[in-house]
Amino acid sequence: MSAVTLPNQPAAPARQSWIQARFGSDFRELLIGAILIAATGLIPDIANSSYWTHAFELVNIFIIASICQNLLLVDAGQTSFGMGAIFGLAGYGAAIANTMHGVSYTWSIVLGLLASLAGGVLFALPALRVQHFYLGFVTLSAAVVLPELAMAFNTYTNGIIGISLQFDEMHKRTIFGMISPLSLVVVVVTIAVLVIHALIHRSLLGRRMRIAAESPEAAQALGVSPGMMRFIAFLVAGVGTGIAGVIYPVIVGFVGPTSFSLDISILFFFAVIVGGRGTLLGPIIGVWILYLLPNILLAEFVNWRLIAYGVAALLIMILMPDGIVGGFNNWRRKKRSAGQRLDLNVAAVLGTQQGAPAEHAPKSDQVLVEVKQGRKTFGKVVAVDNADLVVKVGEIHGLVGANGSGKTSLLNVLSGFSRLDAGSLHVDGVDITRLSPHRIARLGIGRTFQTPRIFGNMSLWENIQIGRDARFSGSKTPIPEASVEMLRQTLGEGSPDWVPHGQRRLLEVMRVALQESKLLLLDEPAAGLSPEERKQFGALLRQLRDQYGKTFVLVEHDLDLVWGVADRITVMDAGRIVASGTPEEVAKDPAVRHMFIESSHA
Amino acid sequence: MIEELGIIFVRGVGLGAIFTLIALSFNVVQSSSGILNFAQGNMFVLGGFIAFMISAQGDPSRLMWFAILPVAGIAIALLLTFQGWVTLLPLRFSTQQNSWIITTMAASTIIGAVMLLLKGPWAQTASAPFEPFNIFGTRTPAPYIMAMIACVVWYVVLRWFLTKTLTGLAISALSQDLEAARAAGLKVRRLQLIAFAISGLVIGTAGYIVAPIISIAADTGIKYVLNGFIASVVGGMGSDIGAMVGGPLVGVLTMFAIYEFGGHFQNVVSLLVLVLVLMFVPEGLFGRARARRV
């Protein structure tokens, strides 16, 4: 078993190659995928087999749609059973423009893409309100409705007869005498979509989408609006699927209601599941298994195709829920990292000196947070009852009280997850009573949650990087670049599974520290920490306050910790503020003594 | 005009009764395991299939019809218990708690595909030994009225079962707090399977009863599960009284849409209703608004 400890001194940062910076460990999968697509797309053409050329052209555009489904399902967490409808919208849009209105196909492509974009927007709207199976049902309805609409509006769509198109030039093997323009276009576009997916996955947008998918409230605390992320995801997936949709008529030469039945939507979804959700190669393998295999092996029994989808998906979910490529990746990862552990030494990372006397920053009287007569009710329950709270700049403010006293409700109000029914909330003079949580986060207010929101679908470094992504720009004492770079090198691509619970808490604090917020709201941060870890934690808070001038509001049950670290303490009971002042004052307050009977934990 | 509205109303409520039955069968499973079974629509069609198989031998007598009714219910109940077991299997081991969305969709696809293979894409018909009723001067086929009766019967039975019998109470407990139920010693998996079986009884008998008025084909299942879902959403997911109200509401709206715009737009109108309800009243008429996690 190997343990990795962060060194005390930041090392000189190593230069990353451009490819490593953009793609990291995904590069190998990307390369394999590109080779597979190019090989299957071009070799049949070179070998002059028109059957296989046609088959693989279709396979590759289905792969495009599945890649978009993968992005939508895994990166953005949106369950959509209706991508076939968007595929159809694009295909119909292009075909109608080209055939029935005489528009050149180049412009028809644009119109088709616009149609798919509109489809994406239409799907995004319910996604703002509902998720998971509700969203699945809504999108499923759309997939069912589209062919019916195509038949109903038969003056525009030619009804059941469909629209025929001619693209002879695209199918002739004119390039180098061996390859048709269509094959080349399909291969290039499919590889491009694969590369774009990899780029998005690793980009700022991709990270934001993933945290919004896994934990909307943590995302909001990091300044990300989950609604906006879902909207963008549907737009991107919509246009991507539309790209596949506008190429479809060129390959098949025909567009009709039966071309875009529910089967296609199911294929795209199940291809992602069977191939491996979240993996780059998953959609490729998925489409091969679900579409190619039945069409080759059971060519006469086309109706067995649907059974194949169902049975394959069922078996995969029971035996290998991460899909074929995912299962393979898991097996490789287990072999590689058996027994890896990580020990985090947070203080060293933040560049604070070990052993040097902590400089005590002069206490300021400037008010940072002010709650005036705040009142919050949930039905008949009064969670916060006319509370007045003042938090000064650069202080550690403890908020204590029994369960149900309203301290977490008050913290929720401060971070914007709850809105006051009456009263006001000002931070740094700005009235933030009515702001949404992600806007409040962007004003320089960070927050941790009772259970550490460490994202399993991201590496250790990415978990902290999202804090840096949400960096508050007005910070006066930023964390040195070298420390951040050293963090990145040490944590690297490690998995959060390597870190035990107590250290996950520290990881979350590191993330919030990198956010460089001026105000940090910590919700029961000591929960799950051993006594030694609690001492380290207290020291960390003091160092962050002294060295970086941060202000803390700490909701905590561990009174020893609070009394040891806080500059001022507020005690709550049944929604009311019972006492507020320095630790000594509060300890002597008769109203407070009445509540706590000389025990060290609330 | 009044006559037409009358017909729309009666048929709408009858059709709505079908949606209510589907919604009732949703509720039992959804409240005990959080699973919304996509395959319910195809199970419904399978119930109708059993009626078709009986009629294919020649028109059944009333005695015969009533005798096979429970058989249909039990057959579908057994099938649903098996499907439930398969669906619950991955939930035991993996952290992927949403696998049921995929496995129920897969089950629905498989059933539909089997029907397609056995019978092709054409609809089968079934007949039942009951004369049409005369309402508002026109003949309304008996299954519409029988669906309404079945609705009320099942509602009463389910309410009695879930509140007055020990097993039913245990299943209700699952819907309120799964972990507490497990900690209290309830055999959670067994109860969840019983819930699947009950939903099978409801949906199997429903399909059998309304077989003459539905198209027993491979692709109707999806449409019924969608409409049943819409009825659930309108009434409030998990609420039986909501299902009783939501079903007829959606049924009448659908009938009206067919009358006004033609059969092609039936599903478009349903989709619009669904989206509007989800956007503005996502918890439905009788449902509980869900809390947000912080």
Image (cartoon, helix red, strand yellow):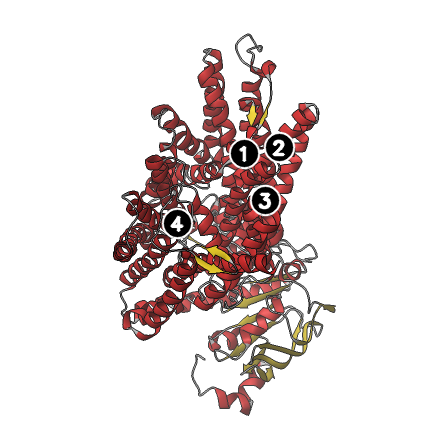
Q: What element carries label 2?
A: helix
Distance of mark 2 from mark 3, alpha carbons?
Answer: 26 Å
Q: How many labels does the image show?
A: 4
Residue at screen point 50% across, 46% down: A140
- Tell me the tag on residue A302: none
Side (left or right) of B61 relative to B140: left
Question: Do tag 3 and tag 4 residues touch (Cβ < 8 Å)?
Answer: no
Q: Is mark 3 on a helix, strand or loop?
A: helix
Please give the residue where the numbered disc 1 appears in the rendered image.
Answer: A257
Q: Which of B160 and A455 is in front in this view?
A: B160
Up-down relation of residue A78 to residue A403 (above or below): above
**Which numbered disc covers residue A234?**
3
Image quadrant holding the C terminus of chain A, namely bottom left
Callout 2 amino acid: Thr
Q: Circle 4 is placed at which residue position? A: B212
Q: Distance between the residues labelled 2 and 4?
A: 34 Å
Sequence-earlier tag: 2 or 3:
2
Residue type at tag 3: Phe
Q: Given the image, what chain letter belongs to the residue carrying mark 1?
A: A
Q: Do labels 4 and 1 share a chain?
A: no
State yes or no: discs 1 and 2 in contact (Cβ < 8 Å). yes
Q: Where is residue B116 in the image (x, y as percent from the top left)?
A: 37, 37
